[in-house]
Image: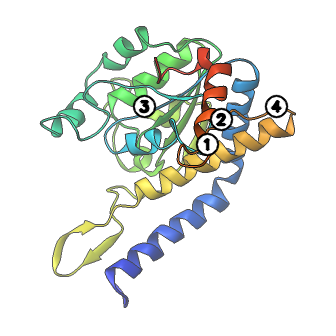
Amino acid sequence: MSDGTPADLFFDAAIGLLQRVREEEAEAITAAGTLLADTVAAGGRLFAFGAGHSSLAAQDVVYRAGGLALMNLLTVPGVVGVDVTPATLGSALERVDGLASAVLDTSPLRAGDTLVIISLSGRNALPVEMALGARALGVKVVGVTSVAYATETSSRHSSGTFLRDHCDIVLDSKIAVGDAELTLDTIPAPFAPASTVVTSALMQAMMATAAAALADRGIEPPLLRSGNVDGGHDWNGRVMTEYGDRIFYRY
């Protein structure tokens, strides 16, 4: 590690990755945001899925002030985060064949919807099967992943393929295999992962693109406002009433 505090070096690494995805993934971000706008305009619904820490970026765009009210979280019990005990259960479930199919069979996903699947490695059975199954239903799939894993690791799905192989659009987070940006002579393993920072930025850039694309077509984007600003609850109530049949995180 070169001169600078570990905090400085992490910020440098994260900023460098953000600059890379801004420049190198601009076309894909525009395409993904346009696809979300197309889906909304056509009456479709939006879903996001991620397992383990990848779920953090999915949750970040659901029921979020400043975000599209129509983005719903597609959940798989036991893999949404580290709130299960043992936490390692989620990692094990990601490798189980058939789990994604069972979830899709009971989910509200239907033809004309769009599903964003987030998986850093894209190598486990769950995200691969999720993408395959969703597309078979007529759902458009956006994959947010690190393409490097597809060239530097082997697939854990029976097909030998990765998430990136079954998407309509792929956003490459550029995260290095292992997801740790820093090394230090006194520490035996790489440390300081940046995938959450970069993946969340990609997701929010895509959502911002979608909102602007809808506005360009004369469609008011169904955005939520903070409940902590005056009038926020009334605003959100109006949006949720208007789009209630496309929102699945409320009852």
Q: Residue at x 47, y 76 (%)?
A: 12
| Horizontal and vertical percent position of residue 16 | 53, 70
- Relative vertical location of residue 205 with respect to residue 7 in this rendering, above or below: above
Classify mark 1: helix, strand or loop. Answer: loop
**Residue 66 drawn at (x, y percent):** 61, 45
User: Does the image show residue 160?
Assistant: no
Residue 44 is situated, as x and y percent measured from the top left of the image, at 66, 19
| Dot 1 and dot 2 residues touching (CB under 8 Å) | yes
Q: In front: 196, or 159?
A: 196
Residue 109 against residue 95 in the figure, above or below: above
The kind of residue on which mark 3 rests is: Thr
Residue at mark 1 to residue at mark 2: CA–CA distance: 7 Å
The image quadrant where one finds the N terminus is bottom left
On the image, numbered disc 3 is attached to which residue? 161
The tag earlier along the polypeptide, 2 or 3, is 3
Q: Is residue 192 left or right of residue 28?
A: left
Q: Which residue is mark 2?
A: 235
Left or right of 106 in this view: 201: right
Which of disc 1 and disc 3 is earlier in sequence?
Answer: 3
Work out whether mark 4 precedes mark 2 in sequence or the reverse, and give the earlier one: 4
**Please, what is the three-letter code of the amino acid marked with disc 1?**
Arg
Tell me whether circle 4 and circle 2 mark residues in contact (CB < 8 Å). Answer: no
In x, y percent, where is residue 153?
Answer: 34, 46
- Which residue carries the number 1 mark? 225
Which callout, 2 or 3, points to the residue nearer the camera?
Answer: 2
Q: Which residue is mark 4?
A: 219
